[in-house]
Amino acid sequence: VQLQAFGGGLVQAGGSLRLSCAASGFTSDHYAIGWFRQAPGKEREGVSCISSSGGSTYYARSVKGRFTISRDSAKNTVYLQMNSLKPEDTGVYSCAGKVKPVATMLGADYAYWGQGTLVTVSS
């Protein structure tokens, strides 16, 4: 079971990025997937998550209305579209999978983690 996050980069405030979480070794639509981020000197926080069916999505208050999570079962990939980026969105973004259909925003609920991808938003 492997998850790999990619798509990070440097962007100016107000810009957009799309992160991808590619799954291998398992069918990602059997798992709920969460996106988490960790800014320098801060604790990891949940950003968004999606149920195994894709029917339920959740967002942190700080990103609601700006970020959109989605999944493509055919590509075994979950996406995080990030619009209207702010400097406070800077951090390492990681995706994680849990072997249950219900998505949660707690990192401790997730058993499988991919390497993170760095997002830097300049002011």
Image: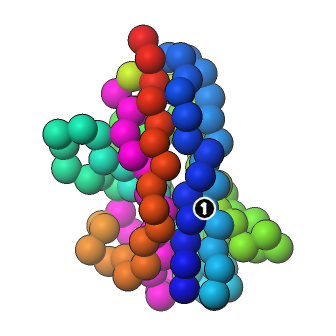
Image quadrant holding the N terminus, namely bottom right
Q: Locate residue 42: give its quadrant.
A: top left
Position of residue 109 measured from the top left corner of the image (x, y, whole percent): 32, 77
Residue that appears at 75% across and 66% down: 72
Q: Nearer the viewer, residue 89 or 10?
A: 10
Q: Which residues are magenta?
A: 88-105
What colouring style does the render use? rainbow
Position of residue 36 measured from the top left corner of the image (x, y, whole percent): 39, 55
- The reply, left or right, for residue 35 in relation to residue 45 is right
Q: Nearer the viewer, residue 68 or 27?
A: 27
Q: Does the magenta portion include 89?
A: yes
Q: Amino acid at mark 1?
A: Cys
Vertical position of residue 1 compared to residue 60: above or below: below
Residue that appears at 17% across and 39% down: 41
Q: Does the magenta portion include 24?
A: no
Position of residue 105 measured from the top left corner of the image (x, y, whole percent): 35, 63
Residue that appears at 55% across and 58% down: 5
Vertical position of residue 21 compared to residue 59: above or below: below
Q: Looking at the image, can residue 116 be seen?
A: yes
Q: Nearer the viewer, residue 19 or 106?
A: 19
Q: Looking at the image, can residue 57 be seen?
A: no
